[in-house]
Image (cartoon, rainbow, N blue to C red):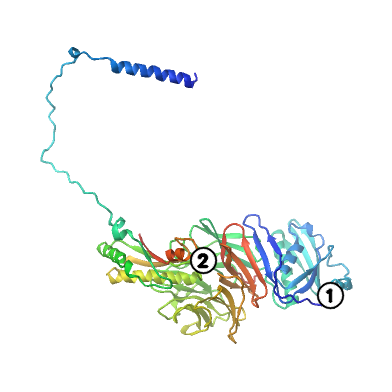
Amino acid sequence: MRFTSASKTVALLLASIALISACSTPVPLEDKPKIVEKSPEPVQVDNRAVTTQKAVEVDPLTVGALAKRSIYFDYDSYIVKDEFKATVEAHAKYLVANKGRKILVQGNTDERGSREYNIALGQKRAEAVRKALALYGVADAQVEAVSLGEEKPKATGSDEASWAENRRSDIVYQ
Amino acid sequence: MKSLFKAFVLSIIVLVSNAAQAQMRVEVSGVGSSQFPIAVAAFADEELSPQLVTSIIRDDLNRSGYFKLIEVGMPISETANINFDTWKARGAEALVVGSVQKRGEGRYEVRYKLFDVAKATMLSGFAMDTPNPKIRLTAHKIADDIYEKLLGLPGVFSTRIAYVTKAGAEYRLEIADADGEGVQVALTSKEPIISPIWSPDGTKVAYVSMELKKPIVYIQNLITGQRVTVANFKGNNSSPSWSPDGSKLLVTLSKGAIAQVYSINADGSGAQRLSNSNGIDTEARYSPDGQTIYFVSDRSGGAQIYRMSANGGEAKRITFKGNGYNVSPRISPDGNTLVYISRREGGEQVYAMDLLSGQELRLSDTNRDESPSIAPNGRYVLYATQAGRRGSLGIVSTDGKVKQKLTIQAGDIREPTWGPFMK
């Protein structure tokens, strides 16, 4: 049997009427059933028990200074600028407190010039960050500085804004 | 009378098609300062074989930039009687004739002769037993022989090139004939591949792959596909180049600090530091006699090219011009010419320097040039450049006159390397 929209509407209408009829039937007060009181079953609970709860823990790596993973560099420069010192310090403190954690510092360059020379330039940027971390006490074993050269740009334009975005070291937790 | 052609724009576009991969297109914008007028007759019965040898030979000679092809009407076999006067009258100084014969299932014999028209003598000729898959190779070898007999230099038509392509998120290392045909894929990857370089015997390619999220040097045997990890030290491992006997490589290792030049055995053992600075030392290449190393260093400020003994030690700076940026040194097979990339007002361009006199010459008129590679006959430089927003390849002759651009339809092409002579 095929349900046409007309027969569906009729069915809906009938169901609605039935529902409304049911709701509108008044219940006489004298027919109200008697409420029987029952005493509750005895429950085996130690009313001195304590269950430990943990307050919501925010991963420190996802908030504040530690969420910042990139350090940007000026053209032809490998010096960590003042504005990024707080980021470096925050990650250094975390790594010193968590000796089991390791990071990769990936250095990047803009697209101009020889790919091989840019591998080496990118390394200088990764090294600058590694050295800065070491000055705050981070162990060598926890940091590997590598370079991606110009090969993995974040910004793909050929203008100063894109180039500035790519002159960058990234901290990658492993 | 020989015609003299200065560099000028030609509208010769040679389309080389290739069933599986993207079509490579060659655009000629400059030819040699003199072009040898040559008539290449169609080889008799060449339709017997699946590849037409005459057009392969003509395209090779055309692309070389040093020949002017004279029109020829009909096929001429190597047994025909030649009327040299008619060829003289048409302006040809040399004549090529030949034939193709079937020698069995999938086997052919290609015969060829080269004549000096003025002297009415035969300069060269041979017959080559050729299985089906090698017909193009035989045609290239004939073109090589013509080039060598008339110009005095070995031809490179039967050599191969390798390069990296990037299309979307996929990188490939591809191997092709020097004319862009016969493309084979050596490696596919989702991460960058850079710095491929042929072994001296042409059976292996060393390259840098970032498949493990950092630069690592591998050697791949092209025949077996087998890969050897040559260098995976802490930090970066890159910039491979081969010793003349193929037993060692020069590599750049950062070993957790700054890039320095090391030599290492082809099996990855015996890494030895050769350079000695607190800055960047990279892009090292041996001279053809293996006695000297040329490399890039930033020890005096910008990137400059230096030379030192193959045992390391004191380094002597050899580039001084340009905007503080001279990189990617390559040495010609005769050891006399340095080819490199120099940044000038026009951008990064291909330069050649005579190592005896120090005289330099700009070779390319493109800019944003990278990654030069010298042909094994020392006459041409293959390099990477940009065509609009896409990576393309360029070829220039070491005297700067021959100029060509090679593009593929889909994606970027970069990091070319010219393979050696092979049997």
Looking at the image, residue B416 lies above or below residue B50:
below
* Along the line of sight, the residue nearer the viewer: B115 or B342: B342
**Residue A158 horizontal/vertical position (percent):** 50, 64
* Helix, strand or loop at mark 2: strand
Residue at the extreme bottom: B357
- The chain carrying label 1 is B
Q: Quadrant of residue B347?
A: bottom right
Q: Can you say which quadrant of the picture contains the N terminus of chain B?
A: bottom right
| B90 vs B176, nearest the viewer | B90
Q: Secondary structure at mark 1?
A: loop
Q: Nearer the viewer, residue A61 or B124?
A: A61
Residue drawn where x is 61% and y is 78% of the image? B333
Is residue B178 in sight in this rendering?
yes
Residue B309 seen in render: no
Q: Residue at label 2?
A: B194
Q: Residue at x 17, y 46 (%)?
A: A52
Q: Which residue is mark 1?
A: B117
N-terminal of the pair, mark 2 or mark 1, is 1
Residue A16 position within the rendered picture, expressed as x and y whole percent measured from the top left: 36, 19
Label 1: how many residues lie within 10 Å, few (<14), some (14-19) or many (20+)? many
Q: Quadrant of the C terminus of chain B?
A: bottom right
Relative image position of residue B345 (x, y in whole percent):
54, 75
Callout 2, which amino acid? Answer: Ile
Chain letter for mark 2, please: B
Q: Is residue B182 left or right of residue B319?
A: right
Quarter of the view holding residue B237: bottom left
Measured as percent of width and height from the top left, residue B417 is found at 58, 69
Distance Cα–Cα, label 2 vs label 1: 48 Å
